[in-house]
Amino acid sequence: MQETTMAILTLYGALSVTLLALWIRHKSVLRQRKKLALKLGSMKGNLTETSERLDLLSRGVDTILSDAPEVHDLLGVHKSLEAAEALLFNQGIPVSNSESCAIASHAVKALLSHYPEDSTEDERSIVQGLKPLSKRLTAILTEAEMKAEDIELSADEYRRAGELFHSVERFDWAADCFQRANDLDPEDESALRSLSEIQRKNGDLESLDRTLERLLAIVPDDIGVLNEQSVLLDSTSDERLTRNRKRLEAIGATSTASEEEGELSQIAQRARDSDVGGASPSNTAPRLIEKAVKQLLLGEFRAALESVETAIERDRSFGQAWSLKARLVAADGGTIKDALKCIRRANALGEYTVILESEILDNDGRTDAAIEVLQEHLSRTPGDAEARSRLSQLWLASGAADSARQTLNDAPEESWSSASLHVMKGRLSLVESDNHRDDTGKIDPLPVIDALVSFDRAVEIDRESGLAWLGRARALRYQKAFDEAEVALVRARRLIPDHPSISLEEAQLFLEMGDLEQANALTLEATTILKDSKTVPFIRGIIAARHGRLEEARKLFSLCLQIDPNHSRARLNRSSAALLCDDLAMALDDANQLVENHPNHELGRLRKSEILMNQGDWPNAESELDLCT
């Protein structure tokens, strides 16, 4: 009985435990189902939201691209690149060379289909989105270890592909494509010009020379190409240098090197002279400096700086490298401290650096320091005519004409064999004449004669001195010898074509000759070079006044006076313009200020008298006339 009871109780207990376990399991399943339902609901909501956002994005993209179908069509190029990438790299089986070339050619042609060929490169625009695809294509081709010659394209397609790769700065692929374009079509001028641009930036001067020679076979009289190749061949015995010079002379395009180009050529020549018997034809410091000079003359500043840095690494005791680096650092906007360090290093190695140091200090606004450097140098070497001329010029630019004149007076007799001192003496004589004109309204002929004598002496010493011819032209203009002045100006423009004062002097000459149209054109040319010149608005004001545009003339004279309140001719002319515009108050104010600053200015007193008569102030007008007489 007891055993039966125990068995029943055991059975009930087992059933109870089983039921409890099933109940707990059931609750767990219910909770999991609830959680799953919640997750599914959340996922459904997220999917709905994502679907709505994708739909909104799709409609937005369609709306944006509706006005730019050419961008929408780039999706096809993207698919072509995807397919090419998959076929070349993701098949898991090797691809034959012919298949690889066909795949790559198809991808390039898909890209070029959106880069038209019916216009020049300058007029042809690159569709937005094409550049990233071009970058991706070059990455695919590079990874596939392919070259431009492996792609099956026509000459025009190679050229257009090169232009695309050039636009994304893949210069290696661009150069290869331009080279292939020229191989297939030797008459393709555009491909050669683009190739020369890349070679110039890369500093590959030997390849650039070959490319320029090919260009000359197509366009034999291209002045730019002839000049550029002449720079590359300078100081060589290559017959092509003589050919280029004769051709330039025949087409009337010969020009004299500017002062800066002359200095750079001297640096290159000294570098060649110091490399006599050098072992390496291209890697020595002198050859690298010669290369840097050529790159500078070609306008490749960064490449030139890299060549100079390499030259210094080759030979840190090569003074010309430090001197050229100082010039480049200063021109690149580097710190003056770094430039001066390079100058001192070059000077310690025997280089002549005093002029360069003074120029750098003066350009930095430290004129006093530049003057001090030159004075210290002249105390040791008083016979240095170039340094003395530079010091006199700095004194004159600072407004200290007496100090500038004294600097020349202190020059030893032997230094007067330099044209630069005579040029400065002539300039100081013209300044004296200008001061007399500002004080009296008349030009004193004696300083003008002295100036002409000085400039003539400078020309006798150095007929290639552009500044001497420019000064001579100005002195002759003061003497009303307009024909001779024009001849001197033509000579000056040939010698120093980039000098900012050339166009201004020509404008003033034509103004006095009565050719207002030519004077105005030359003034506009000067405006692009000289931003804050007081002479430009003054000349334009005179031209406007002679055309009867008095209000415009008055504004231009006012602009001139804003730049230089002591400009007596601008004040006199503004007074005249204001009088003709019936602005008697401004006219009288200008006349009063003019005669107060320059009591002996006869034209100023005559103008004041005329204004007083217009105001009915006859007694004061009469007294002004009495002072004139």
Image (spheres, rainbow, N blue to C red):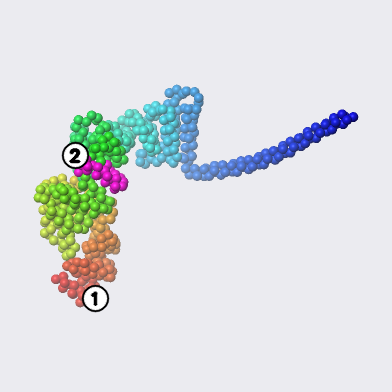
Residue 496 numbered tag: none
Determine which quarter of the picture holds residue 322. top left
Residue toward you, 332 or 326: 326
Report the residue marked by disc 2: 249
For the record, the magenta segment spans 324-352
Please tell me which residue is depicted at 76% across the width and 37% down the height of the picture: 23
Magenta portion: prevailing SS class: helix
Q: Mark 1 belongs to which amino acid?
A: Gly
The residue at the point 18 percent across, 72 percent down is 624
Location of residue 412 with respect to 93 vertically, above or below: below
Instruction: Indicate the secondary structure of the residue bearing disc 1.
Output: loop
* Residue 20 percent location from the top left of the image: 77, 36
Q: Position of residue 203 (x, y in %)?
A: 30, 35
Instruction: Report the front residue among 278 and 187.
Output: 278
Contact check, label 1 and label 2, Cβ < 8 Å: no
Occupied quadrant, residue 232: top left
Marks 1 and 2, how far apart at CA? 67 Å
Residue 12 to residue 50: above or below? above
Extreme-right residue of the structure: 1
In the drawing, what numbered circle is on residue 616? 1
Q: Which amino acid, by three-letter code, is at mark 2?
A: Glu
The quarter of the picture where the C terminus appears is bottom left
